């Protein structure tokens, strides 16, 4: 009996020690991350699905609801132009049915695009189907403006250890909506903010949109610069701005008042076949990393778009392949390379890994690069050795016990 207890003790000790060593090795090699990844889904202009392809809209929202658990989808943002014709009842009914799949399943927001309003910017139909009644009792719903409508609204979610606020603004928000958005953002400075509005970026990433039926957007016709100047730039908690309306995909990054990067993104696929072929955006907030992977997926086609306008990273880069072709990944940022090899630099200069030509401390820089390289190699070898040692210890412990038995 005593012998048996001793054997068990040796066996358990060996296993625990082995597991501890393996865990320590994994920790030092950076595999252990405490943050959990999550995704938000962006639904660009669905107007043509509501008009002619309601089954594609259904496929989109059913896919989101089905994937919500596996992909940890915490929020869905619609970018407006829910319907093609603001006064067509059947289109609103189609849209309401499709988005209804998300109700009670995945927190989500909508906003009126230009097609969702009359030429006088009346939003009665939008509010009839997607008004306060639909959202006000959801625990994640923050509030809306003007009172009694859902023209502009805000919501909350928490994920990956951080708190977020999402603000959805009607097409070309007027000065009252701008003032309201600022007050909401200022009262939620402890949260990271995402802003969605229907029209903001043009196809080349400019803050100028088109096709607005002669109505003015902001002080100048079709000019959306005021949205940046009056809402995005001064509110340092905004890191992401999403828009649709202009056919295609574009993006730009600019520093806000605090010097922090703000990612501004356009996506709208309505000009493709079948009213947009079901393309939607998956924004994956990667665990333990300060970046977002953006993918464009169609649950209707079961395909991804892989061109650089539609698949990219926001935030820090880890390797060159995450940057545009002419760029290098340098200290977490994609930057234009000034050199690729020493031959690209003037004589006496070397080309650093960062893509910069440098002539100061020639020997030291080379040595430092070598030092970093060898430290990385050493850490890797050490981590692997510790894992192997742990495994050997487990096997060895088991053998001792087996020998004791025989
Ligand atoms: Zn539009």
Image (cartoon, rainbow, N blue to C red):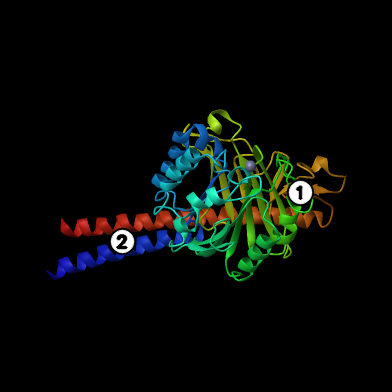
Cβ of mark 2 under 8 A from ligand 1: no
Residue 280 position (above or below residue 176):
above
Which quadrant holds residue 281?
top right
Q: How many marks?
A: 2
Q: Is residue 394 left or right of residue 128?
A: left
Which is more toward the observer, 305 or 58?
A: 58
Residue count near mark 2 (Cα–Cα under 10 Å), binned few <14, some 14–19, many ≥20: many
Residue 180's spot in the image, x, y percent? 64, 65
Residue 255's spot in the image, x, y percent? 73, 58
Residue 273 position (above or below residue 316):
above
Residue picked out by circle 1: 223
Point 20% across, 68% down: residue: 6
The N terminus sits in image quarter? bottom left
Mark on residue 15? 2
Tag 2's secondary structure? helix
Point 65% across, 37% down: residue: 247
Quadrant assignment for ligand 1: top right
Residue 161 position (above or below residue 253):
below
Alpha carbon distance from label 2 to label 1: 67 Å
Mark on residue 105? none
Cβ of mark 1 under 8 A from ligand 1: no
């Amino acid at each position: 009996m005593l012998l048996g207890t001793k054997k068990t003790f040796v066996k358990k000790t060996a296993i625990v020690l082995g597991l501890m060593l393996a865990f320590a090795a994994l920790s030092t090699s950076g595999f252990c991350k405490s943050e959990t990844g999550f995704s938000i889904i962006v639904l660009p202009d669905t107007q043509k699905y509501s008009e002619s392809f309601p089954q594609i809209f259904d496929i989109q929202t059913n896919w989101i609801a089905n994937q919500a658990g596996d992909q940890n989808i915490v929020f869905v943002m619609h970018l407006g132009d829910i319907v093609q014709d603001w006064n067509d009842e059947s289109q609103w009914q189609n849209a309401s049915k499709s988005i209804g799949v998300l109700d009670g399943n995945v927190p989500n927001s909508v906003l009126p695009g230009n097609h969702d309003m009359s030429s006088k910017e009346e939003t009665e139909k939008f509010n009839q189907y997607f008004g306060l009644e639909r959202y006000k009792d959801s625990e994640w719903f923050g509030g809306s403006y003007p009172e009694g409508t859902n023209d502009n609204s805000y919501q909350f979610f928490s994920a990956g250890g951080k708190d977020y606020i999402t603000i959805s603004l009607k097409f070309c928000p007027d000065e009252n909506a701008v003032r309201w958005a600022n007050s909401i953002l200022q009262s939620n400075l402890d949260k990271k903010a995402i802003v969605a509005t229907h029209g903001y970026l043009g196809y080349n990433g400019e803050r100028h949109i088109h096709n607005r039926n002669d109505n003015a957007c902001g002080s100048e016709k079709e000019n959306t610069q005021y949205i940046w100047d009056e809402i995005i730039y001064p509110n340092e908690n905004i890191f992401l701005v999403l828009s649709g309306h202009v056919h295609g995909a574009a993006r730009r990054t600019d520093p806000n008042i605090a010097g922090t990067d703000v990612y501004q993104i356009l996506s709208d696929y309505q000009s493709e076949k079948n009213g947009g072929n079901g393309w939607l955006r998956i924004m994956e907030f990667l665990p333990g990393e300060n970046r977002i992977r953006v993918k464009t997926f169609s649950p209707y086609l079961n395909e991804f778009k892989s061109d650089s306008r539609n698949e990219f990273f926001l935030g820090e880069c880890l390797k060159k392949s995450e940057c545009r072709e002419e760029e290098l990944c340098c200290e977490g940022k994609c930057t234009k390379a000034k050199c690729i090899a020493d031959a690209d630099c003037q004589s006496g200069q070397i080309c650093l890994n960062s893509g910069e030509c440098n002539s100061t401390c020639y020997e030291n820089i080379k040595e430092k690069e070598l030092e970093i390289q060898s430290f990385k190699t050493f850490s890797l070898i050490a981590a692997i050795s510790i894992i192997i040692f742990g495994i050997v210890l487990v096997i060895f412990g088991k053998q001792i016990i087996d020998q004791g038995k025989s």
